[in-house]
Amino acid sequence: MGVVACLSLTRTAFAMFLGEYLHTLDSKNRISIPAKFRKDLGRVVVVTRGLDHCLYLYSRKAWEREARLYAAEVNGSAARRGLARLFLAGSAEGEVDKAGRVLIPEHLKSFATISDKAIIAGVADRVEIWEEEAWKKYTAEIERDANAFAEKVDN
């Protein structure tokens, strides 16, 4: 089940992607984007390395906002430079085709260890693409430790 809604945060409207879907990469490394996400993502998207060895997928407009934030960090501390390089240098722009598919470049497919099936998860203003078993393991750990995480976040 997925829901896409438009919310206002600090007076800036952005797409809100929610839900998780199982999709299969085709022989040309294309993956179908859930229909509920396509309108807000638009025809041109950016896919990049994400944290936890998943991929982040942004609309072009959302990516421009993210890229500006990372670009400001390229001369910062080693940690800031590293994250900026991770996200910016690994990014790839692509078009969503008429069938709703987007190409996952080989270097990004390898980074996320995606071979066949992938979970496409809406996570607020971005979409994440996870190797199916990695997603199952990650969510099981989060579900198991949710109460402890809530305690840490609350402090």
Image (cartoon, helix red, strand yellow):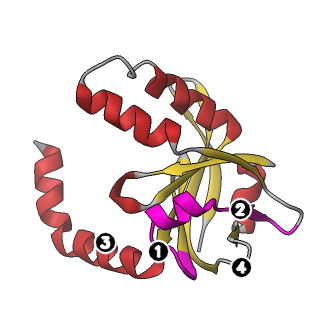
Q: Secondary structure at mark 1?
A: strand
Q: Which mark is residue 26?
A: 4
Question: Callout 1: few (<14), some (14-19), or many (20+) C-alpha neighbours within 10 Å?
Answer: many
Mark 2 sits on what residue? 103
First-in-chain label (4 vs 1) = 4
Does 103 appear in magenta?
Answer: yes
Residue 75, given in percent of the width and then of the height, sits at: 35, 17
First-in-chain label (2 vs 3) = 2
**Quarter of the rendering occupied by the N terminus:** bottom right
Quarter of the image where one finds residue 67: top right
Mark 1 sits on what residue? 131
First-in-chain label (3 vs 1) = 1
Residue 27, given in percent of the width and then of the height, sits at: 72, 80
Q: Amino acid at mark 3?
A: Tyr
Q: Amino acid at mark 2?
A: Leu
Q: Secondary structure at mark 4?
A: loop
Q: Residue at x 79, y 57 (%)?
A: 96
Does 108 appear in magenta?
Answer: yes
Residue 48, given in percent of the width and then of the height, sits at: 54, 49
Q: Mark 3 and mark 4: span between their CA atoms?
A: 24 Å
First-in-chain label (2 vs 1) = 2
Residue 44, given in percent of the width and then of the height, sits at: 77, 45
Name the foreground residue: 3 vs 133: 133
Residue at the right extreme of this rendering: 98
Q: Amino acid at mark 4?
A: Asp
Q: Mark 4 and mark 1: span between their CA atoms?
A: 14 Å
Left or right, residue 138 beside residue 61: left
